[in-house]
Amino acid sequence: MIGSFSIGFLRIGWIDVVDVLLVTALFYQLYKLLTGSVALKVFLGFMSLYLFYLVVKAVGMELLTSILGQFMSVGVLAGIILFQQEIRRFLLNVGKATSFGSRMRVFPWRRDASEERMNVTPFIEAAKSLAGKQTGALIAFSLASDLKFFADSGDLIDATVSKRLLMSIFNKTSPLHDGAVIITNGRIKAARCILPVSENPDVPAALGLRHRAAIGLTEVTDAVVLVVSEETGQISLVRGGEVFRNLAPADLRARLNEFLFDAEPKPAPAGPRAAEVAA
């Protein structure tokens, strides 16, 4: 074999080295994708069963091999059913990394003009006022994912963003205050939307249903979610399953501009106002 070398009785080629490195990278990405969720335990259980199947097959236990073989024959289909959310997240991450649109972000003249011009001030002012009144709010900003499935679960609005409109929607007497507002292309697309609640057991008990819904949405999409706590009045941002808590208006503006418009995320600021990562 060209370019091969020997380690003891093994003869290894450079293709084998690359193959092992790619498999290692794949398993590492799977671990990062599944860590902190119930799916990781299911995956480890499935892999343990598969290793047990290989052992009994090598030993020659024909009856047990036959039984486990029947289970392994439908393993791919079972994996798709069990890990459908994780597979969706994985494909979404791959799509974001390889899409032509994401590559064109390096050319500023090709960026979406509506995205560039979106003013975050109405969201900051509304969040500050709602926090002062301890009125809960949930605002989801769509990025690559259009969140159409979740928008269809609520009431379609398609309105221009304003502080007064956001305050009216989340007013406790409003029929639209329950659920989330979804922002797409700088406009309020829908209100009273239902978001998936995170099943991550590591989410702190201090975080309520709004925060869990925000975490759940960002676990399966690339959306950014603004949360105002009804219990504490704290303002939080959630992205990629991470919760940045107790943000001051200046911190909220900086985070929104970073998460919504910057091509690459910046490190968290130091100091007493630095965001607390809770998930």
Image (spheres, rainbow, N blue to C red):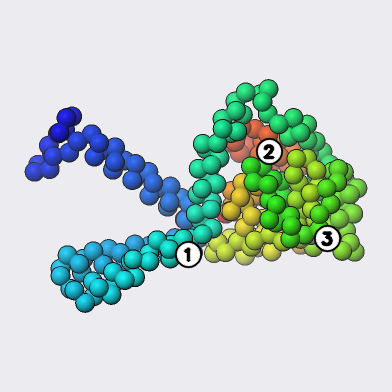
Residue 206, how many percent across, how many down? 65, 63
Residue at image mark 1: 82
- Which quarter of the rendered picture does the N terminus lie within? top left
Return the residue found at the far left: 9
Of callouts 2 and 3, the N-terminal one: 3
Return the residue found at the far bottom: 63
Q: In what element is the residue under mark 2?
A: helix
Q: In what element is the residue under mark 3?
A: loop
Q: Amino acid at mark 3?
A: His
- Which quarter of the rendered picture does the C terminus lie within? bottom right
Q: Is residue 117 above or below residue 83?
A: above
Q: In what element is the residue under mark 1?
A: helix
Residue at image mark 3: 177
Of callouts 3 and 1, the N-terminal one: 1
Residue at image mark 2: 260
Of callouts 2 and 1, the N-terminal one: 1
Q: Quadrant of residue 117?
A: top right
Q: Residues within 10 Å of mark 1 (few under 14, many from 20)?
A: some
